[in-house]
């Protein structure tokens, strides 16, 4: 049913009919659940339940995508450190996002860099060698043109990445 067609406009007018758009409630519920999980992860008053929340998140099939979306959400920027740390604290397999976390380490502040480093450090072998090579190249490019407070930490990340080569 096309809600823009002239014949159907009345069906979507709340004064005329109560319309239910299939799937809309599910999206609202899903967004509400995600917001609740983020609040539980990031609010310092909820520290006692953080471990349980991390276990819940790990059980979700798209848990890594959920956390990365939250990390990238500009509204949640002040919680980036907690969200990045949730990636390694939860034990989620982050290997397929190696390059993302290396890029995050180079583009973020020092504390986020530490957390991104921890995510990479917690990755189990084997790693995709093409992704690993891209990550090393990205890191080397960054290091060749930068000398900020993260340089020592990022050099350590480079050594870690080199150790992952097969």
Image (cartoon, rainbow, N blue to C red):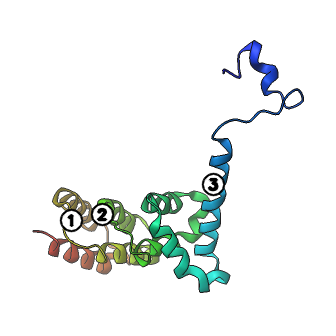
Residue 74 locus on image (x, y percent): 57, 58
Q: Residue at x 41, y 76 (%)?
A: 115
Is 125 left, or right, of 154 in this rendering?
left
Position of 132 compared to 98: left or right? left
Q: Earlier in the sequence, mark 3 or mark 1?
A: 3
Residue drawn at x 76%, y 13% as measured from the top left: 7
On residue 55, the disc is: none
Q: Relative to the observer, which residue lies in front, 141 or 13?
A: 13
Circle 2 sits on which residue? 98
Which mark lies nearer to you, 3 or 2? 3
Work out how far the residue at label 3 is from the one at label 2, CA to CA, in angstroms. 27 Å
Reading the image, the residue beneath label 1 is: 127
Comparing 73 with 155, the one in front is 73
- Tag 3 secondary structure: helix
Label 2 vs label 1: CA separation?
Answer: 8 Å
Residue 13: x and y in percent read 83, 27
Q: Which mark is residue 31?
A: 3
Q: Tell me which numbered mark, 3 or 2, is placed earlier along the sequence.
A: 3
Quadrant in the picture for residue 134: bottom left
Q: Quadrant of residue 96?
A: bottom left
Mark 2 near mark 1, Cβ–Cβ under 8 Å? Answer: yes
Which residue lies most toward the bottom here?
48
Please identify the residue farthest to the top as the structure is shown.
7
Q: Which quadrant is home to the N terminus?
A: top right
| Residue 136 image offset from top left, x and y in percent | 21, 64
Q: Nearer the viewer, mark 2 or mark 1?
A: 1
Q: Is residue 143 visible?
A: yes
Question: Could you tell me which residue is drawn at 55 percent across and 75 percent down?
Answer: 53
Q: Which one is nearer the viewer's eye here, 143 or 132?
A: 132
């Amino acid at each position: 049913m096309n809600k823009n067609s002239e014949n159907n406009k009345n069906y979507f007018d709340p004064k005329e009919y109560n319309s239910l758009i299939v799937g809309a409630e599910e999206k609202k519920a899903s967004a509400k659940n995600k917001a609740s999980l983020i609040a539980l992860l990031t609010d310092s008053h909820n520290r006692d339940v953080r471990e349980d929340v991390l276990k819940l998140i790990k059980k979700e099939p798209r848990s890594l995508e959920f956390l990365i979306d939250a990390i990238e959400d500009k509204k949640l920027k002040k919680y980036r450190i907690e969200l990045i740390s949730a990636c390694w604290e939860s034990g989620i397999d982050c290997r397929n996002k190696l390059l993302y976390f290396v890029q995050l380490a180079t583009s973020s502040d020092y504390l986020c860099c530490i957390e991104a480093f921890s995510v990479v450090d917690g990755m189990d072998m084997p790693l995709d060698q093409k992704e690993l090579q891209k990550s090393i190249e990205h890191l080397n490019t960054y290091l060749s043109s930068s000398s900020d407070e993260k340089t020592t930490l990022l050099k350590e990340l480079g050594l870690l990445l080199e150790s992952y080569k097969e």
